[in-house]
Every structure is written in C-alpha cells, then in structure tokens.
Amino acid sequence: MKVRVVVTGRSYHASSNLPREIEVPDGTTIAAAIDQLEQQLEQGETFPASCLVAVSGQHLGTRGTLPDQQLRDNDELMLVAPVAGG
C-alpha cells in the first residue's frame, strides 16, 4: 500500500532526500513506517521522540507516545519536529 509522507519542522533539512511517498506492506504500523523513513536519513540523523505525528489530518501525539495503529492505503503520514528559538 502507498503512504504519502510530509516532514516539516526541525528535521526538515535532514529529510530533503526522503521520498514523498513510500510503499509499505498491509498491516504496517505508524511506528514501523517512521522507522523505515528514518533508515533513509543521513547517518546519525533521527526523528526525535518529541516529533508530532498526524495521520490523514488526525493528530496522534508524539513519536514517543504513538498508539499501535496500522496505516491504510493512501494515508498521509505527517511528522512535525518541534522548533525552538526566539
């Protein structure tokens, strides 16, 4: 199944080489899809546990507190890494 990918916030620069869409097997969880994406980041880069996660417009919490939920075909997986500054 296909899942659209959107990454923004602090990790945006690290994600410039990530695909805008990934192919995952039926039954893939959100956490597994994020792990798959993280393997494609540059060495040493990660999505932080504080990264906000939304699937098809529904906010699900942070990467560190995700429910064990499966993705569906054509879902949009959005990762928003918090940005600090002033």
Image (cartoon, rainbow, N blue to C red):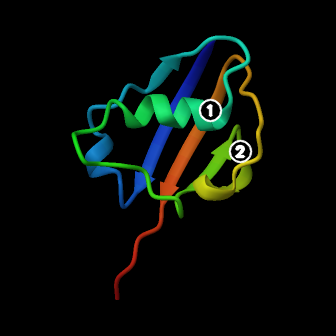
Residue 6, horizontal then vertical, whole percent: 49, 39
Mark on residue 42?
none
- Mark 2 residue type: Gly
* Extreme residue in the left direction: 43
The answer to whether residue 84 is left or right of residue 16 is right
Residue drawn at (65%, 35%), measured in percent from left and top?
A: 30
- Mark 1 residue type: Glu
Residue drawn at (26%, 50%), measured in percent from left and top?
A: 13
Quarter of the figure that contains the C terminus: bottom left
Quarter of the figure that contains the N terminus: top right
Location of residue 60 with respect to 27 vertically, above or below: below
Which residue is identified by label 1? 76
**Circles 1, 2 touching at the beta carbon (< 8 Å):** yes
Which residue is identified by label 2? 57
- Residue 30 vs residue 6, the one in the foreground: 30
The answer to whether residue 71 is left or right of residue 18 is right
The answer to whether residue 56 is left or right of residue 31 is right
Residue drawn at (27%, 46%), measured in percent from left and top?
A: 14
